[in-house]
Amino acid sequence: MKLLIALLFPVFLSCSMVAEDKRPDEFPVVSCNNLEVRNFNLKISDAMKNGEKWVYHPLLVIQEYRKVADTRFVSILLNNDSVENPLNSTITLVEEGYLDDSVRGQWFRFYLERESSESVWKIREVRQAYLCGRMASPKEFSKERCP
């Protein structure tokens, strides 16, 4: 019996303790909240006047809006309207693996725009949804706060 336990114990340890069939960025987003962006766009204007360079790159703009969490899974998808000198950019950020019993992760979609290739990026819209972590929670992102 001890030999059987000794043989099976390493097999048990090698199994993942999180049994998921999909990555969190593959879960559907069924509803989302729109977040306030006006005050942040004022911050962008002030940063431009002060000569700060982060206002000219969409990924740095969203990182300034919201610091990416230190989590188990982070996915960032950047979609520009053109290869050279884009005027519109959509960035989807998915985080999963918070140390929280109720919230497992969050989904954000940032819509950015600028007037010309030399202009600063402004955020037109930010959408947010939650992925709940309770065992009975559906595997979908929703605007509803997790219980």
Image (cartoon, rainbow, N blue to C red):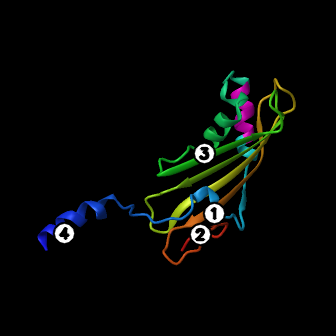
Label 1 vs label 4, nearer the camera: 4
Is residue 85 rendered to the left or right of residue 110? Answer: right
Q: In the rendered structure, which segment of residues is drawn in magenta? A: 41-48
Residue 84 — which label? none
Q: Identify the residue position indicated by label 4 in the image.
A: 5
Work out whether mark 4 precedes mark 2 in sequence or the reverse, and give the earlier one. Answer: 4
Work out whether mark 3 precedes mark 2 in sequence or the reverse, and give the earlier one. Answer: 3
Work out whether mark 3 precedes mark 4 in sequence or the reverse, and give the earlier one. Answer: 4
Residues at badges 1 and 4 in contact (C-beta under 8 Å)?
A: no
Residues at badges 3 and 4 in contact (C-beta under 8 Å)?
A: no
Looking at the rendering, in which quadrant would you find the C terminus? Answer: bottom right
Q: Identify the residue position indicated by label 2 in the image.
A: 139
Residues at badges 2 and 1 in contact (C-beta under 8 Å)?
A: yes
Q: CA distance from mark 1 to mark 3?
A: 22 Å
Q: CA distance from mark 3 to mark 4?
A: 48 Å
Q: Residue at x 71, y 68 (%)?
A: 30
Please name the predominant secondary structure of the magenta segment in the image.
helix
What element does badge 4 sit on?
Answer: helix
Q: CA distance from mark 2 to mark 1?
A: 6 Å
Q: Position of residue 139 (x, y in %)?
A: 59, 69
What element does badge 2 sit on?
Answer: loop
Amino acid at pointer 4: Ile
Label 4 vs label 2, nearer the camera: 4
Q: Residue at x 36, y 61 (%)?
A: 15
Q: Identify the residue position indicated by label 3 in the image.
A: 66
Instruction: Judge whether residue 145 is colored magenta.
Output: no
Label 3 vs label 4, nearer the camera: 4
Q: CA distance from mark 3 to mark 2?
A: 24 Å
